[in-house]
Amino acid sequence: MCVDSRAINKITVKYRFPIPRVRDLLDQLGGACIFSKIDLRSGYYQIRIRPGDEWKITFKTNEGLFEWLVMQFGLSNAPSTFMRLMNKVLHPFLNKFIIVYFDDILVFSKTYDQHLQHIDQLFQVLNHNELYVNLKKCIFCSNEIAFLGFIIRKDHVLMDEKKVEAIKNWSTSTTVKQVQAFLGLASFYRKFIQNFSSIAAPITDCLKKGAFQWGPKQQHSFNLLKESLSNSPVLKLLDFSQAFEVAVDACGTGIGVVISQQGHSIAYFSEKLSKSRQSWSTYE
């Protein structure tokens, strides 16, 4: 059910709780070789509205007035409230053998026996807090697992094959919204692409207010991004016990960085230079 919550959201005192960055979560997985993904069943609906406050989110239908008894989607404080609950419940395990992003929980371990112990500990805590899982969406004891748009395996991370296929089949964009959608997906995986910002520069330039014009430069950039993303490398997961190697480069439109360990790339970073910065000398 979809309810318009704009009215209540306007007068709600905003509660802020940090939402983890996906790349920070992935950085914790180095050294793990066995994984389980646990999906909470209708996560938001497992949080009860405080008794007495139900009337605040009453909604009207042709059958009359109804009140939510559980936390609905669309409330401005719902994401922060849910992440706060997950962090409170799973706090003893976070940064050790569990990472969590809303209702997606990933258990990671170095050995099979250790992994069974970790799963048992997790389920005990979930049971104690009366949180229920959706077994149909759970995956247990796998050497390779899809999580938050990535494929995770021992010491390595790569793009989800479904996303790669979607990029391959993406037709040429003809409107601002279509271009923004493509750039949004491409930017999510930018750490896989060397000099991403420079490659995407012709497209980002045409998105400036009143400047949308799709020409040969934009088409070339679009094709190059599709090709790069479709053939993206397998990146190494971080190992904080090893030294980092940093290589930097610059061109007329942007700067790029490659971070690696023992000759294996970990991530690519890039930034498009502003007009004024493009005139700077190299050492600046």
Image: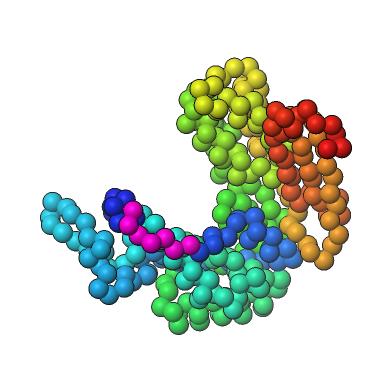
Q: Relative to 78, does residue 251 appear above or below in the rendering?
A: above
Find the residue positioned furthest to the top. 216
Looking at the picture, tell me which residue is in the foreground, 189 or 253.
253
Judging from the image, the colouring scheme is rainbow
Looking at the picture, tell me which residue is in the foreground, 222 or 85.
85
User: Where does the C terminus fall, quadrant-wise?
Assistant: top right
In this view of the protein, can residue 54 be seen by the observer? yes
- Is 3 on the left or on the right of 270, as rendered? left
Please name the predominant secondary structure of the magenta segment in the image.
loop
What residue is shown at x 79% (from left), y 49% (from top)? 259
The segment highlighted magenta reads 10-16
- Snapshot quadrant of residue 64: bottom left
What residue is shown at x 75% (from left), y 29% (from top)? 278
- Snapshot quadrant of residue 130: bottom left
Q: Position of residue 191 (x, y in %)?
A: 69, 45
Q: Relative to 12, does residue 172 appear above or below in the rendering?
A: above
Does the magenta portion include 15? yes
- Snapshot quadrant of residue 223: top right
Looking at the picture, tell me which residue is in the foreground, 281 or 42.
281
Q: Where is residue 7 in the image (x, y as percent from the top left)?
A: 29, 52
In this view of the protein, can residue 154 be seen by the observer? no
What residue is shown at x 56% (from left), y 80% (from top)? 121
Q: Where is residue 211 in the image (x, y as percent from the top left)?
A: 54, 21
Q: Relative to 253, does residue 8 appear above or below in the rendering?
A: below
What residue is shown at x 81% (from left), y 51% (from top)? 260
Q: Position of residue 271 (x, y in %)?
A: 70, 39
Find the residue positioned furthest to the left. 63
- How many marks do you count on the picture? 0
Does the magenta portion include 58? no
User: Where does the N terminus fall, quadrant-wise?
Assistant: bottom left
